[in-house]
Amino acid sequence: MSDDLKLPELLIDGQKIDGRTAIARRYRDQLAGLNVQLGGSPSIAESMLMRRAATLTTLCERDELKILNGEQIDEHNYRQNAGVLKGILINLGTVKKSRDIRGDDYRTYDPHTQAVLDAD
Protein backbone atom coordinates (compact mmCIF):
# COMPACT_ATOMS: atom_id res chain seq x y z
CA MET A 1 0.00 0.00 0.00
CA SER A 2 1.37 3.43 -0.84
CA ASP A 3 2.21 5.92 1.89
CA ASP A 4 -0.50 8.36 0.80
CA LEU A 5 -3.23 5.76 1.41
CA LYS A 6 -2.41 4.84 5.00
CA LEU A 7 -5.25 3.50 7.09
CA PRO A 8 -6.12 5.16 10.36
CA GLU A 9 -5.24 3.46 13.63
CA LEU A 10 -7.27 0.28 13.99
CA LEU A 11 -9.78 0.64 16.80
CA ILE A 12 -12.49 -1.91 17.51
CA ASP A 13 -15.08 -1.09 20.17
CA GLY A 14 -12.85 1.76 21.33
CA GLN A 15 -9.85 -0.50 21.86
CA LYS A 16 -6.63 -0.19 19.90
CA ILE A 17 -5.83 -3.50 18.21
CA ASP A 18 -2.34 -4.96 18.40
CA GLY A 19 -1.68 -5.63 14.74
CA ARG A 20 1.28 -7.96 15.23
CA THR A 21 -0.58 -11.28 15.23
CA ALA A 22 -0.92 -13.16 11.93
CA ILE A 23 -4.70 -12.85 11.93
CA ALA A 24 -4.57 -9.12 12.74
CA ARG A 25 -2.09 -8.59 9.88
CA ARG A 26 -4.36 -10.50 7.49
CA TYR A 27 -7.37 -8.47 8.66
CA ARG A 28 -5.44 -5.24 8.14
CA ASP A 29 -4.31 -6.45 4.68
CA GLN A 30 -7.96 -6.95 3.76
CA LEU A 31 -8.83 -3.45 4.98
CA ALA A 32 -5.87 -1.98 3.11
CA GLY A 33 -6.88 -3.69 -0.13
CA LEU A 34 -10.45 -2.47 0.14
CA ASN A 35 -9.23 1.01 1.06
CA VAL A 36 -7.12 1.16 -2.10
CA GLN A 37 -9.99 -0.18 -4.20
CA LEU A 38 -12.26 2.58 -2.86
CA GLY A 39 -9.72 5.29 -3.65
CA GLY A 40 -8.27 5.78 -0.17
CA SER A 41 -11.02 7.99 1.19
CA PRO A 42 -13.90 5.77 2.29
CA SER A 43 -16.95 7.34 3.90
CA ILE A 44 -17.94 6.35 7.42
CA ALA A 45 -20.49 3.90 6.02
CA GLU A 46 -17.93 2.43 3.62
CA SER A 47 -15.48 2.05 6.52
CA MET A 48 -18.10 0.13 8.49
CA LEU A 49 -18.75 -2.17 5.53
CA MET A 50 -15.02 -2.60 4.96
CA ARG A 51 -14.56 -3.82 8.55
CA ARG A 52 -17.44 -6.29 8.16
CA ALA A 53 -15.94 -7.53 4.88
CA ALA A 54 -12.50 -7.96 6.47
CA THR A 55 -14.02 -9.87 9.39
CA LEU A 56 -16.06 -12.15 7.16
CA THR A 57 -13.06 -12.75 4.91
CA THR A 58 -11.03 -13.77 7.95
CA LEU A 59 -13.78 -16.16 9.08
CA CYS A 60 -14.09 -17.68 5.60
CA GLU A 61 -10.31 -18.11 5.31
CA ARG A 62 -10.24 -19.79 8.73
CA ASP A 63 -12.79 -22.33 7.50
CA GLU A 64 -10.98 -22.78 4.18
CA LEU A 65 -7.79 -23.62 6.07
CA LYS A 66 -9.68 -26.22 8.09
CA ILE A 67 -11.07 -27.78 4.91
CA LEU A 68 -7.60 -27.93 3.33
CA ASN A 69 -6.30 -29.62 6.48
CA GLY A 70 -9.02 -32.26 6.24
CA GLU A 71 -11.05 -30.87 9.16
CA GLN A 72 -14.80 -30.48 9.33
CA ILE A 73 -16.49 -27.09 9.30
CA ASP A 74 -20.02 -25.83 9.75
CA GLU A 75 -20.85 -25.71 6.02
CA HIS A 76 -24.07 -23.77 6.54
CA ASN A 77 -22.21 -21.11 8.49
CA TYR A 78 -19.48 -20.93 5.83
CA ARG A 79 -22.00 -20.51 3.00
CA GLN A 80 -23.84 -17.87 5.02
CA ASN A 81 -20.62 -15.93 5.71
CA ALA A 82 -19.59 -16.14 2.04
CA GLY A 83 -23.01 -14.95 0.88
CA VAL A 84 -23.08 -12.00 3.26
CA LEU A 85 -19.50 -11.13 2.27
CA LYS A 86 -20.50 -11.13 -1.40
CA GLY A 87 -23.38 -8.77 -0.65
CA ILE A 88 -21.14 -6.37 1.26
CA LEU A 89 -18.55 -6.35 -1.53
CA ILE A 90 -21.28 -5.67 -4.09
CA ASN A 91 -22.66 -2.85 -1.93
CA LEU A 92 -19.19 -1.35 -1.69
CA GLY A 93 -18.98 -1.48 -5.48
CA THR A 94 -15.84 -3.60 -5.40
CA VAL A 95 -17.24 -6.54 -7.39
CA LYS A 96 -19.73 -7.03 -10.14
CA LYS A 97 -22.77 -9.17 -9.55
CA SER A 98 -21.58 -11.64 -12.18
CA ARG A 99 -18.78 -11.96 -14.69
CA ASP A 100 -17.22 -14.44 -17.08
CA ILE A 101 -14.72 -16.56 -15.15
CA ARG A 102 -14.17 -19.22 -17.80
CA GLY A 103 -10.70 -17.98 -18.69
CA ASP A 104 -7.69 -19.59 -17.05
CA ASP A 105 -5.74 -16.33 -16.63
CA TYR A 106 -5.75 -15.61 -12.90
CA ARG A 107 -2.88 -13.10 -12.80
CA THR A 108 -5.33 -10.40 -11.77
CA TYR A 109 -6.27 -12.24 -8.57
CA ASP A 110 -5.03 -11.00 -5.24
CA PRO A 111 -1.67 -12.44 -4.05
CA HIS A 112 -3.33 -14.85 -1.58
CA THR A 113 -5.60 -16.41 -4.22
CA GLN A 114 -2.79 -16.60 -6.74
CA ALA A 115 -0.55 -18.34 -4.19
CA VAL A 116 -3.27 -20.91 -3.48
CA LEU A 117 -3.79 -21.55 -7.19
CA ASP A 118 -0.03 -21.77 -7.81
CA ALA A 119 0.44 -24.26 -4.95
CA ASP A 120 -0.27 -27.26 -7.20
Image (spheres, rainbow, N blue to C red):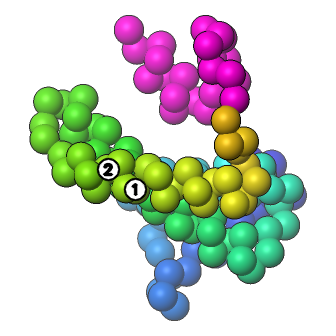
Image quadrant holding the C terminus, namely top left
Report if residue 111 lies within the magenta region. Answer: yes
> Can I make out residue 26 in this image?
yes
Q: Residue at x 80, y 56 (%)?
A: 38
Amino acid of disc 2: Tyr
Q: Is residue 109 left or right of residue 74?
A: right
> Can I make out residue 32 in this image?
no
Which stretch appears magenta? 99-120
Report if residue 76 lies within the magenta region. Answer: no
Tag 1 secondary structure: helix
Q: Nearer the viewer, residue 59 or 98?
A: 98
Q: Which mark is residue 1?
A: none
The residue where tag 1 is placed is 81
Tell me whether the residue at label 1 lies in contact with that at label 2, contact meaning CB atoms closer than 8 angstroms: yes
Q: Which mark is residue 78?
A: 2
Amino acid of disc 1: Asn
What is the quadrant of residue 92 in the picture?
A: bottom right
Q: Is residue 46 left or right of residue 88?
A: right
Between the residue at mark 1 and the residue at mark 2, the CA separation in whole angstroms equals 5 Å
Residue 93 x/y as whole percent: 76, 54
Residue 101 x/y as whole percent: 63, 20
